[in-house]
Image (tube, rainbow, N blue to C red):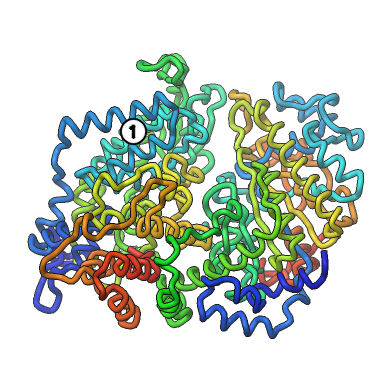
Amino acid sequence: MTTTGLWREFVPGPSDPWDLAKVAHLHRRAGFFANRSELARDVEAGPAASVARFFEPPVPSDDERRILDSLRKGAVSGSDAERLKAWWLYQIFFGANPLGEKMTLFWHGHFATSNQKVNSLRLMSRQNQLLRRHAVGNVRELVGELVGDPAMLIWLDGASSKREKPNENFARELWELFTLGPGHYTEDDIREAARAFSGWRESYDREDSQTRAFRLDESYVDDGAKTILGRMGNWRADDVVRITFEQPATAEFLCRKLYRYFVSEAAEPDAQLIAPLAKQLRGNDYALRPTLETILRSQHFYSAAVRRQRVSSPVEYSVGLLRALAAPRTDVRLLALALACAQQGQDLFYPPNVKGWDGGRRWLNSATLAARTNWATDVIWGNPELRMPPYDPARWGNVSDTERPIETLIGVLLQDDIEPRALALIEETGAGDKPDDLRRALRLIVRCPEFQLV
Amino acid sequence: MPTNRRDFLRRGLGSSALIASTASVPLFLSRSAALLASEDTAADRDRVLVVIELNGGNDGLNTVVPYADEDYRRARPTLARSPDRVRKIDERIGLHSALGGFEKLLERGLLSVVQGVGYPNPNRSHFGSMSVWQSGRLNAKQDDIGWLARVSDRSQAAVGADPAALHIRESASLPQALSGGDLAILSLTGPEQFRRRTAAAGTDDDPAQQRRRDQLAPPVGEARGTLVDFVARTTATTDAAHARFSQLLDSSETSRQAGLRGRMSLIAQMIKAGLATRIYYTELAGFDTHASQAGTHPGLLSELGDSVQAFISDLAAAGEAERVRVLVYSEFGRRLTENASGGTDHGTVQPVFLAGGALRHPFIGSPPDLRDLDPDGDPKHSIDFRRIYATLLNDWLDCPSALVLGHNVEPLSLL
């Protein structure tokens, strides 16, 4: 672990202790919020153990796996996209691997494949499992597998690319959006790479005859000489991927995006802040874990300057509110949650375009903010149409012997990040301790601008 | 429509009736509303621009078809439109047969076709080229301020007034054309999004709780540019819009049609109701026809033509068409030569359409020259798209075009 430099490790001290605000920040960024007991546990455990927990999740039980498998199969066989969203949200909400899901969501936004065009929940769910398998794994291997992923082959037209007239779509987006970023390749490079990615033919799916499948046909592969990013050879698809990941620009591009996702989107980070991360990512041959650990353990990550410097995504906001309030499983409605995320602008499995969700300030406009407020209202006061019960301070978790209920609410949702004037109003509102007092106070908490930020 | 009703709606939150009837309008908004009510804001708000983005890259050569051109037919052995499958304009070009709606508008002098539109060194990336078109700058980045956001920033619209611009969306996110400015611009699928859900009576609506919500309303502008300030502004805009829209949409029949037709019909309702919004933006997606284009492109064109034609007829019947112009564009045209998937890849030039009111010329510019190609084998542009923007900015939106485009651009004789 680095002890010097811009990414030196955070070491708690008397003037900068490991406290609730830092633990809650870690859970908002590396996961999807945490409830009172989880936060208390990690305040006690210290930074090293709290971060390590994210990288060493427990293996899911057989029961858990059976539930997930039946959810997925039900959604796929019923062609019900809403249930497939619920299948994923189940893992985000209840799963024991929040960082894994956070990165799965990152890659979904990065590779941005939409069922709008793929039109197969079976293929979308398989791609989602592929993203999950490599979520905190190796990016080069992930991209290598995505080249032949059926959903991707349909999404970027690799499936209909012919040797004689290769389709340029995948080659272009591979570089522009997935790895190098604009400005590091030419139109000629794209045409040459497109040749290397051709050769797929329709085939038969192992599970289902209605599902499109593709196989690489050697006689269709263009293995002629090509010049790609300045290097000549009889390159094939895996060579293009290898050459792409040899470019320093790929590591820089990915680290910039990780910085926005985990640290701050308030300003474009300095090159000198990105360089050490990119160097580490390349040095580990694109294994992600060391770089993510550097970020999540750093002094910079816990500094007040980057706290609440991201606009929460709809999934973070909608899941986070319920998780922080320790809603019991029986009170959570995953289909309503999926719909709420869509109305706020994040429709899982349907990103808006090849670039994925822009995020940042673009999450919020008066339509999406109204949808956020509506979701919070449903959580707090219940919504009979969606069979959502109201927030119930006695029955939901977070009950404490040592704290007033209103203090707990502020502690799990806002910590210190609130103006004194607003804090006084909220405390006054919840002072009566009765369920409706606390619901009214909660209604005020979600109206604070700070609560939209993570 | 009675003038007094339009005036009432124009004043937006300035109406004391509205303030009285909408319990959820925070106090601070009521104060700004009272201020707005004392100002005459109707004067410069008559003209409306509606932009339709054809997302994905529309195949211009199969939209305004050079059906008699040998080079066109040779480059497109399966996709070329034969003379009997176009609506002939003259002996050289015709509209795709699916564009019956546009043909009707042309006959009535309500459509202009600007041919061969593009810009120097065309960018063939969707996002690169969309950024150029949506920012109005050649070396655009994806976070550059949108050209219509710049126009909106210049308008006098404040919190509590009608929004300067509205995005009636198909996809989820605000287009770059409307992004990056000082104003948070609204994006909606329909009126439902603005109907705020409320708690059961007697729980969250008592006067004490309302007063606290008002007091909590964050002070806008104390730390300009920060994320917290941005959220505070958006919260204020959302509160205002909520009040504004529930009033407006409760009083008119709500659009239930799907697709572009439905979005255009919602825009027509807002215009007819006298909303002071001057810019509306919507999109029609699906034009990225890399494969099996013959199966999808005609349906998109007929949706486009029919929707625009219905929109203009609707406004004309209400006597409102004169103050409305529709701009139809895409990020690029497609390659001259079809690919082996029965589709076309990212290309260069395209025809741009203007509809509404009385337009001076049905056709501007000449069809792309298929013998004078760029090094990639695609037609060169003859009209720079920024000339169309300059015309709309100067002559329609009362906004000096150099402020938006960065320098002076020669307008076209369009309006």
Horizontal relation, residue B163 to residue B67: left or right: left
Q: Secondary structure at mark 1?
A: helix
Does any portion of residue A185 appear in the rendered image?
no
Q: Residue at x 71, y 50 (%)?
A: B264
Is residue B323 depicted above or below B121 in this figure?
below
Q: Residue at x 40, y 37 (%)?
A: A231
Q: For this rendering, which residue is in front, A184 or A308?
A: A308
Q: For this rendering, which residue is in front, B27 or A180?
A: B27
Location of mark 1 (residue)? A144
Is residue B367 depicted above or below A340 in this figure?
above
- The quarter of the displayed image where residue A218 is located: top left
Quadrant containing the C terminus of chain A in the rendered view: bottom left
Q: Residue at x 54, y 67 (%)?
A: B184
Residue B170, image x, y percentages = 59, 47
Residue type at the position of mark 1: Gly
Is residue B198 depicted above or below A319 in this figure?
below
- Determine the chain carrying the residue at label 1: A
Horizontal relation, residue A313 to residue B77: left or right: left
Does any portion of residue B18 appear in the rendered image?
yes
Residue B359, image x, y percentages = 87, 55
Is residue B325 depicted above or below A163 in this figure?
below
Quadrant containing the N terminus of chain A in the rendered view: bottom left
Q: How many marks on residues? A: 1
Horizontal relation, residue A214 to residue A405: left or right: right
Residue B44, image x, y percentages = 77, 74
Q: For this rendering, which residue is in front, A249 or A303?
A: A303
Residue B321, image x, y percentages = 83, 57
- The quarter of the displayed image where residue A377 is located: bottom left
Horizontal relation, residue B290 to residue A356: left or right: right
